Amino acid sequence: MSSLRNAVKRIAHKERSQPQARQKLGILEKKKDYKQRSQDYHRKQDRIKALKSKASMRNPDEFYFGMKNSQVRDGRHVKTLAAKQRENADVIGAEAVKIMKNQDLSYVRMQKHRDMKKVEKLQSSLHHLDYSSVENTRNRKHTIFVESKTHADEFDVAEYFKTVPELAGRAFNRPRLEMLEKEAFESGTVDGEELTEKELEKQAKKERRMARKAGKAKASAYKEMEARTKRVQVMERAEAHLVTEKNVAGKGRKRKIKAAEEGKPAVYKWRRKRLR
C-alpha cells in the first residue's frame, strides 16, 4: 500500500505571495518571520527593562576597584593600558617585562640616532632656505630702486638682469645671456654665431625644465627632512616615557610631583638614601 501511495500524484501546496497592489511593501511576511521578529523585539524590551531597574536601584556612592582599572571606549568598558601591563607582568614575570622594556628602549634610541644622522646629512647637502611652503616662496619680492618715476615706468626686468624674458620672473638659477650663449656654443648648436631668438627660447625652455626638476628634488628633500625631524621628536618622547617607566619600576621610595601632560611623561621625586 505504501508503494501505491507514493505513486499517486499529490497536490503541491504553494505559499501565498504578496498581492500585486502591495508589491511595493516587499515579500509577504509569514508566521515564522513574525515569530522571529517578535522574539527579537521582546528580548530587547526585557533588556531595557532590566537596565532601567538597575539604574533606579543604583547607589550613587558605590565604588569598585575595577573602576580604576577600566575606561569607557566606544560605549564599552575596557581595561586600561596600565592594568593590561600589570596582568602581563603577573603572567610572564617581572624580569621578562624588564628585558622587553630594555629592548624597546634600545630600538627607540637606535631609530632616533639613525634619523638624526639622516637629518644632518640632508642639512649639509641642502641650502636651508626656510622652504616651509610653496606659498611663502611665491610671496617673496625683490625690490629694485631706480633714480626716477620715468625709469620705474620704463623698467625692463630682463634687460636689468641680462637674461631672456622667460627667465626674468625666476628667483634662483637665472643664467645670463652670456652664459646661455656660451653653453650653446660649447654644445655645438651655433658655430661661433650669435644666438637667434628661436635658439634662445629653446635654451630657455631647457633651463626651465632643468629648474623644475631641481625644484622638485629640493622640495622632496626638504619634505623628507621635515618628516624625519618630527619623527626624531616622537622618538625622544617615547624614549623619555620608557626611561621613566624603567626608573619607576626600580627600587626606592618615590612620589609623583607632576602628572603627564602634552605628551611628556610624569615627573617623580625619589627619597634620598644615605650611602654607607
Image (cartoon, rainbow, N blue to C red):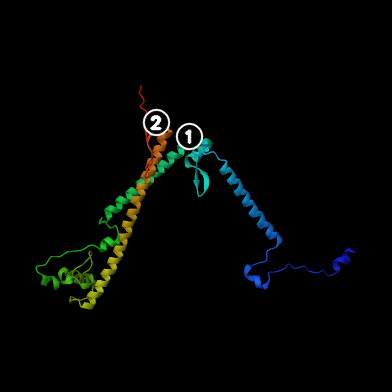
Furthest-top residue in view?
Answer: 276
Q: Residue at x 48, y 34 (%)?
A: 95
Q: Nearer the viewer, residue 61 or 91?
A: 61
Quadrant in the picture for the N terminus: bottom right
Instruction: Provide residue 258's location: percent of width, then percent of height.
Output: 36, 37
Badge 1 vs badge 2, beta-carbon distance below 8 Å: no
User: Which secondary structure lies at badge 2?
Assistant: strand
Q: Identify which amino acid the numbered label 2 is placed on.
A: Lys
Residue at 31% in and 65% down: 213
Q: Mark yes or no: residue 114 visible.
A: no
Residue that carries the numbered disc 2 in the rendered image: 254
Residue at figure coordinates x 67%, y 73% from the top left: 20
Which residue lies under the disc numbered 1? 95
Q: CA distance from mark 1 to mark 2?
A: 21 Å
Number of residues whose C-alpha sits closer than 10 Å to that of mark 1, classed few (under 14), some (14–19) or many (20 or more): few
Residue at left offset 29%, top offset 66%: 212
